[in-house]
Image (tube, rainbow, N blue to C red):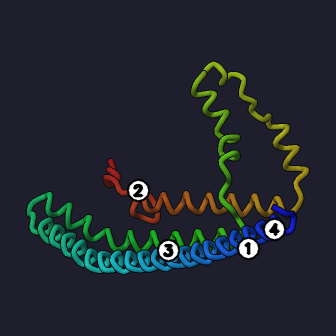
Amino acid sequence: MSVAASRAVLRQSQFMIRRTAVRHSSSSSEAANKAKESASNAASKAQQGLSRVTSSAGPAIAGAASNVGNALRKVGGRTGKVIAYIDTLIPPTVYYSKVGIELAKLVFRGQKMTPPNLATFQAYFEPVINVLRNPSNLRNVNIPSPQSLLGRLRSADKKDLAFYGVTAAEVLGFFTVGEIIGRFNVVGYRGEPAHGH
């Protein structure tokens, strides 16, 4: 076979390889497109089925809960009174928990706060865990002296002092509100009347 003939055979084989590669690439891209379409169809059908299930399960769960609630409300005696009392507490509890969550969100956004990461938690709680594992380490805990606390207070600027003052006022306010709630009275505790002799 001559060189020219072998080159012609080589060109012919390269042409056949390219043509086969083009066919396979176009068929593989078509297959990929078909697979993508079928996957999106399956996903949309699954989403539709899930939405149907949730729309039908919601009323069923609500109906079952209301049936249980109605059955519990029919209970008499002390148990019925406790159930009725708890039943009256549920709506305000749900409402005030939602209000508290929204208030916390506002505070977090306003103060540009972010939750601490895991390393920060570990750094803060590692000494506590070490003391719990080995209570003899409690003697080695460094408690700041009153002089160092006074030194920190004297070196604080106005912004830090204002922050500490506001924090102390908040703590005092929460303590006072807790005491009022605990006493069910604004001033003093309810008790037996004073006996005069």
State which tag comes first along the sequence, 4 or 3.
Answer: 4
> Which circle marks residue 5 in the picture?
4
State which tag comes first along the sequence, 2 or 4.
Answer: 4
Could you tell me the amino acid type at mark 2? Tyr
Q: Residue furthest front?
A: 1
The span from disc 4 to disc 1 (Cα, nearest Å) is 15 Å
Q: Secondary structure at mark 1?
A: helix
Point out the frontmost of discs 4 and 1. Answer: 4
> Which circle marks residue 15 in the picture?
1
State which tag comes first along the sequence, 2 or 1.
Answer: 1
Residue 123: % across, % down: 70, 40
Point out the frontmost of discs 2 and 4. Answer: 4
The residue at the point 73 percent across, 73 percent down is 15
Residue 191: % across, % down: 34, 53
The span from disc 4 to disc 3 (Cα, nearest Å) is 44 Å
The span from disc 2 to disc 1 (Cα, nearest Å) is 101 Å
Could you tell me the amino acid type at mark 3? Ala
Point out the frontmost of discs 2 and 3. Answer: 3
> Which circle marks residue 189 in the picture?
2
Residue 24: % across, % down: 61, 72
